[in-house]
Every structure is written in C-alpha cells, then in structure tokens.
Image: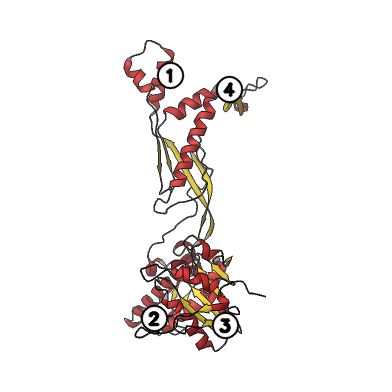
Amino acid sequence: MRMPYLDLFTPSFLFYATHHCASTYWQYFRFSVGGMSDVSEIKGHRRTYVGAMPGKIIQCLKKTKTENPLILIDEIDKLGRGWQGDPASALLELLDPEQNVNFLDHYLDVTVDLSRVLFITTANQLDTIPEPLRDRMEVIEVSGYVEEEKLAIAKRYLLPLATRNCGLDDNRLLIDDNAIKRLIKQYCRESGVRNLQKHIEKIVRKVAYQLVNAEKDPPILVNSDNLTTYVGQPIWTSDRLYDSITPPGVVMGLAWTSMGGSVLYIECTNKKPKYFYQSTNTTDSHSDSSSDSEEVSNKKGILQVTGSLGKVMKESISIAHTFATQFAASGAPCFSTTTVTDNDSADSNNNQEQCMLNPTESSKAALFLQESDIHLHVPQGATPKVCILFIYLLYFK
C-alpha cells in the first residue's frame, strides 16, 4: 500500500510539524524550499560541474541511512522560479507515486526507489501552491492556538526561555496570568505565538535593565495594571464597536481571519442633506417649479465604498445596490412603521408602533436609492478585506 503525501496547511507555523515528526520512530529529515529557484537543489548537479553534489533527497538518504525516512518539506508555498528551472515541476516527480519509484538524481545518474518514503509538507497559503502539485497531496488544515493554549505555551516554554536567555532567575520576575491574557487579547492577535514571544522577550529585557540599574528590587511583578509600562499602549482595545443595538445604517456580518471567525461591522449613511429631499418633493408636487429645483431632483446619486475592500466585494456591493433599487422600483410592497392608537384608552402611552406592508413606500424607496449619495464603509481600513461573496444591507429610518 502506497502512503499518501500530507500537506499541513496552517495560517502560521505552529511547531506542529517539527514536534510531531521528531517524536515519531521514523528517521527524520527536514529541509526548507522557501525561495528556492534552482532545480539542482532537489535533483542534484551533474558531475561535470565543479563542486557538484547530490540533491536534498539523496543527502537525506545518506544522513538517515534508511530507505523509508520521514522527509519534511517546509514552506512549499514559497517556492521560487528562475532561469535555473522550476523547483515546483521537479517536485511533481518526487511526490507522484507513479514516478518516484524511479527517481533520477543527476549526480548519481541512477534511479532510486522513493516509494517507501513518507513526505510531509507545510504551507501557510494554499493559493500559491501550483495546482498540479497540490493535487498530489492530501491537505490537512491545522487550526491556530486558542487563548488557553497560548497561555500554557507562554508559561511553560516562552517565559522560561526568555528569562534564561537574559540570565534572570525564576524568582526575579513574576508575570501574572492576567497580564499574559491581556497580551494575547490586546497585543498579539495571531494564530501562532511568534508575536507573543517578542512581547515577552521585550518585558524580560526591560526587567533585566531595571535590575541592573537597581531601579527596582526583586522580585518584579508584571500584572495587567503596569503592563503598558513595558509594552506600550494596546493595539486592540475592544472587540465591539457598538455595545448596544446597532443604530440604523449599521449591520453586522461574519468574517474569517487567521484567528478564526470574527464580527465585521458594515456602516452605511446618506451624504445628502435633508433639504435635498424637501426640494425634490416640492418639485414633484408643483409642476411650475423653477429650473434649479428640476436640476436638483434629476441629479443621480452615487455609491462610495471605503475600507480596503477587494475587487469582488466592490462588485458585490454594486450588484446589491442595483438589485435593491430595481426591486423597489418594480412596485414590490415595502414595510413601513405606523402608529396604532388605542381608542378605548385616553392614555397616549398606549400607542403602539407596528410594521405593516405599505405598497406606496416602494416608490419612495426606489427614488431614495436612485438619488441618494450613499457612503458604505467597513471599519479597520488598514486591513484588506477579500471574499468570494459579500452581501450588504441598507437600513434607513
């Protein structure tokens, strides 16, 4: 039975592949292909060249001294391509079960059977991997760390490593769990722990500086209150922009990031002043209106989109706006809010608002969408937003 070749896909390298491969009983060999643009690195150099040597695969067999090792090919999504060949095309022969039985290395110039070798590759993005190469692998998506896992990694591994590198004892620095949790939530929103490691090392270095200058006596406690003294102001302060019910013109959507699912707010407002519509209504009611009023009423509205949105999202917004305008202009009944008064009671507080179908509201809605200057914005404009399907809702009161 031929073993499948695995591709571990994760938004950020999580040390899964290295630790899992090293903990097995297989002979383990790892090499990175990030930025590799020379086919000879994989298939070897011909012996006619000065300084020729075998490729990485033959070097692996030489080092492990077995015919069925475990080979980890790291950063396969960052393969380069130059005048010396295409390494991705060279990997096709290596990862194809029908061809790697007779793998030919240019240095040895003899065929080598690689059918018993287990190949595992790692990647951060699947889009940059060539389609023929991706079809030869079984893709396994590895999720990122959750908050509890990051807290355990920071306490058991990152903090002891940082204190040891700075020459500090364990009793000289104490970091509260709440401080680490605040680091994770407000400073290090990522799937891995690289940024968290940098912040912990920054804290340890500042504590070591304070101890050397005798500014504070050990042990130094770092908690959530004095955390900003060591790492500065937080980058993210809150997950919600609106604490209560969203106002008219704001809707909530779902987004996917390297941390998982998150809430995305979509804000929409009308840029034209209220007197514009008053002038429009006056023009419709009086046929002998001035030319200026007619010019204002015939002005078509525009749709402005901001927030670092992708091309597909902008096209989806334009389609949704066109559909909403045509749907309202087709005479479809729209909902309107009416006040119902209780005649049996003299108390005006018993009045209730009900949402009822009103066919006359469709023409007003169509006119509003056609003549309004609508500005749609998605917060966090510095973050690019790309998706396949994007639907937005417009709420007007």
Q: Judge depth for marks 3 and 2 and give the one in front.
A: 3
Q: Quadrant of residue 112?
A: bottom right
**Residue beneath label 3, please?**
69
Mark drawn on residue 281:
1
Of marks 3 and 2, which one's residue comes earlier in the chain? 3
Depicted 276 relative to depicted 289: above or below: below
Determine which residue is flagged by label 4: 359
Q: Which is more foreground, mark 1 or mark 4?
A: 4
Q: Contact (CB < 8 A) between labels 4 and 3?
A: no
Q: Amino acid at mark 2?
A: Asp
Against 77, is 354 above or below? above
Q: Few, some or many C-alpha atoms within 10 Å of disc 3 (few <14, some 14-19, many ≥20)?
A: many
User: Which image quarter: residue 198?
Assistant: bottom left
Q: CA distance from mark 3 to mark 2?
A: 53 Å
In this rendering, would 150 be left or right of 162?
right
**Residues under labels 1 and 3: Cα distance?**
80 Å
Q: In this rendered view, identify the residue nearer to me: 214 or 88.
A: 88
Distance between mark 4 and mark 2 Cα atoms: 76 Å
Instruction: Identify residue for label 2.
Output: 217
Q: Earlier in the sequence, mark 4 or mark 3?
A: 3
Q: Amino acid at mark 3?
A: Pro
Label 2: element kind: loop
The reply to whether callout 2 and callout 1 are in contact (CB within 8 Å) is no
